[in-house]
Image (tube, grey):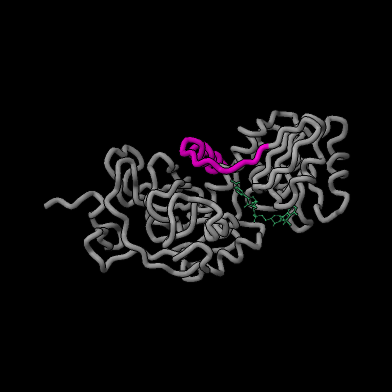
Amino acid sequence: MPLPRSGRPARGGVTRSRDNPRVSLRAAGIQAFGDEVALLELPEPPPLETGQVVIEVKAAGVANWDEFVRTGDWDVGRVPPLALGVEAAGEVVDVGPGVEWPAAGAPVMTHPLPLPYQGCWAERLVAPARLVAEKPDNASWAEAGAFPVPALTSEQVVAEVLDVQPGETILVNGAGGVTGGMIVELAANSGATVIATASESSAARVMALGADVVIDYHDPDWTSLARDAARSTGIRAAANAAPGGEADALSTLVDGGRLATITGAPPPEERGISIANVYIRPDGDELRLLAASLAEGKLHIDIRASYPLTRAADGLAQATKGSGGAVVFEP
Ligand SMILES: NC(=O)c1ccc[n+]([C@@H]2O[C@H](COP(=O)([O-])OP(=O)(O)OC[C@H]3O[C@@H](n4cnc5c(N)ncnc54)[C@H](OP(=O)(O)O)[C@@H]3O)[C@@H](O)[C@H]2O)c1
C-alpha cells in the first residue's frame, strides 16, 4: 500500500505517521500560555495539505516577539501545547500536493504565519510553500534563520508605510537592535539620509549599516540633536523601533511628517503627522526579494548567540534582553 505523502521516511530515519505513537517531534515551547519555555515532545505533523512543505529546521530565530507568543499576546494561529518560534531556515524534506517549488533538498527560510502546525523551534516545521524563500548560499543557516522577521518588518516600514524617498532625511530610533539596524540599512539603500539613535557601543555598527549620523539616545537632549542634524530640510519620516520611544521619535518630525512605530504603542496624533502602528505581514514574494538583497550583501544580520533547543529558556532570556545581535536555536 503506498504511504501518504507525509508518511514517507524523512531524513534522519524518522517515519512521520499519525499511527505511530513512538515517533515524536522534539521542540521548545509551552504547554499553556504564560508557561516558562521547556523542551516538548509533540506528535508528528498530520499528512501534508495542498501547498505545504516540511522543513528540517537548521536554525530558528529567537527574539523579544517570541515572548509575546509565550504570553498569548501575539496570535500565531495555534494554541498550546505549542512550539514557539516564527522564523526559521532549513532543508525541505517533504512536499505536499500541488507544490511546484521548493523541491525536497532545497535550502530555504520562512516566516510561516499563521502556523499550519507548530512553531519554528522544532526539529521539523510545516510551512506553506508560498511563504518560503531560497536561502542564499553565502548566508549561514543561523543568518537565514534569524532573517525573515526583521527583514520583512523593515521592508514594510521603509518601502510600504513610510515610502522613504531618495534624498529624504529619516530618523531611526532604536537602530542598535536587529530590526532597527535593518531599517537603517534599507533606508540608506533607498538613498535617504539616515539619522539613527544607538548606544555608544553600537554606534560604529550602525554607521557601517549606512547611518549618516548616530546620536546616543541616553543623552537627554537627543531629540534636539537629531533635529539639528537634519538642518533646514527637517526630518520628514521616522521609524521607531525602541519600546517607549514613540513620543520622542514623533517630536523630531516636521509638521505633516510620517511616523511608523513597530512597538505596538502609537502615540496620539499631532501637527498633521501620519502615524502607523506597523505589524509584520508574512509575504513570500517580498521575502524572496529580501533574500536576494542578503545574497548580494545589501543586507546584513549579525548573529550574537546560538543555543540548542535544550537551552531554549536561556536563549529566550538573552534575546528579550536585547543583545545587539540576533539569537538563534540550532536544533
Ligand atoms: N510590529 C512588528 O511586527 C515587529 C517586528 C519586529 C520587531 N518588533 C519590535 O520592535 C522592537 C525592536 O526590535 P529589534 O529586533 O530591533 O529588537 P532588539 O534587537 O532586541 O533591540 C535591542 C536594542 O534596542 C536598543 N534600545 C533599547 N532601548 C532603547 C531606547 N530607549 N532607545 C533607543 N534604542 C534602544 C538597544 O540598542 P543599543 O545597543 O544601541 O543600546 C538594544 O540593543 C522590539 O520591541 C520588537 O518586539 C515589532
Q: Is residue 59 magenta?
A: no
Quadrant position of residue 195 = top right
Q: What residue do we see at 29% from left, 38% from top?
A: 98
Q: What residue do we see at 53% from left, 64% from top?
A: 34
Q: Position of residue 156 (x, y in %)?
A: 59, 37
Say which quadrant the C terminus sits in.
Answer: bottom left
Q: Nearer the viewer, residue 256 or 182?
A: 256
Q: Position of residue 326 (x, y in %)?
A: 59, 57
Q: Position of residue 172 (x, y in %)?
A: 73, 43
Image position of 11 (left or right of 269): left
Residue span colored magenta: 276-297
Residue 82 sits above or below residue 289 on the image: below
Q: Nearer the viewer, residue 32 or 315?
A: 32
Image position of 140 (left or right of 299): left
Residue 164 shows up from this direction: yes
Residue 188 shows up from this direction: no
Tell how many labels. 0
Q: Nearer the viewer, residue 4 or 168?
A: 4
Q: Position of residue 200 (x, y in %)?
A: 79, 56
Q: What residue do we see at 54% from left, 39% from top?
A: 290
Q: Nearer the viewer, residue 328 or 299?
A: 328
